[in-house]
């Protein structure tokens, strides 16, 4: 029995393998993502980027101020503290139309506060989240209520863990406006 391949056989099997690998992604419906910029499509789901984890827990509108209030959980799995006191450098909020074009964005005049613990006290997680700690924050986005996404729009919430050293590394949540409406109907907000 001969185990030799001719050049023609090698090219034929190489082409078949390339087609099979390329087609596998289409058949499974998987979305190829950049591991340095994960994109999450559902509220309440999290992701990790290096030693940092993030979860966008809820999106609410404050009717008295017109601000958006984004409840965001961060897990610092590093041996160094994670600076959190500069929300204008770390968070960007956009509303995209059905074609993916930006309708509105805000990355300035943002404020951040630590979510109160069960004891009613603010945990010591600002200005820095200590190493190996999980912190929950409320990110206040001015003027969001007047520009919140319609059901056919998409909310894009981006967190940049280390803007000074790695501004290109980010976690992004892209949530359909229709899903936000359903989420708020369930909570009564």
Image (cartoon, rainbow, N blue to C red):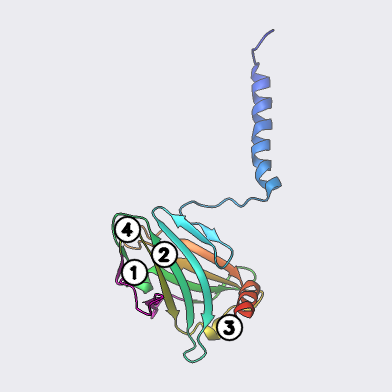
- Does 107 appear in magenta? yes
Distance (Cα) linking label 4 and label 1: 14 Å
> Sequence-wise, which precedes: disc 1 or disc 2?
2
Q: Any mark on residue 189, and which?
A: 3
Q: Can you identify the residue that label 1 sits on?
A: 84
The residue at the point 59 percent across, 78 percent down is 149
Q: Can you identify the residue that label 2 sits on?
A: 74
| Callouts 1 and 2 close, C-beta under 8 Å | yes
Decide if residue 166 is on the left or right side of residue 20: left
Distance (Cα) linking label 1 and label 2: 10 Å
Distance (Cα) linking label 4 and label 3: 38 Å
Number of marks drawn:
4
Foreground mark, 4 or 3?
3
Under circle 4, the secondary element is loop
Q: Can you identify the residue that label 4 sits on?
A: 165
Distance (Cα) linking label 2 and label 3: 23 Å
Instruction: Please tell me whether residue 45 is drawn above or below residue 36 in the rendered image.
Output: below
- Residue 87: horizontal and vertical position, in percent? 37, 73
């Amino acid at each position: 029995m001969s185990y030799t391949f001719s050049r023609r056989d090698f090219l034929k099997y190489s082409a078949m393998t390339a087609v099979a690998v390329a087609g596998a992604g289409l058949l499974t419906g998987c979305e190829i993502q950049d591991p340095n910029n994960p994109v999450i499509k559902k509220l309440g789901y999290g992701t990790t980027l290096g030693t940092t984890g993030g979860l966008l827990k809820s999106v609410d509108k404050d009717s008295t101020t017109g601000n958006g209030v984004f409840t965001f959980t961060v897990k610092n799995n590093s041996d160094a503290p994670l600076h959190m006191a500069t929300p204008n450098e770390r968070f960007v909020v956009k509303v995209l139309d059905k074609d993916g074009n930006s309708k509105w964005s805000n990355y300035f005049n943002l404020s951040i506060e630590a979510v109160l613990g069960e004891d009613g006290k603010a945990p010591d997680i600002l200005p820095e989240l200590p190493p190996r700690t999980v912190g929950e924050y409320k990110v206040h986005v001015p003027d969001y209520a007047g520009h919140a996404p319609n059901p056919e729009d998409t909310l894009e919430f981006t967190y940049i863990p280390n803007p000074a050293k790695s501004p290109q590394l980010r976690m992004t949540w892209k949530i359909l406006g229709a899903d936000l409406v359903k989420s708020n109907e369930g909570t009564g907000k």
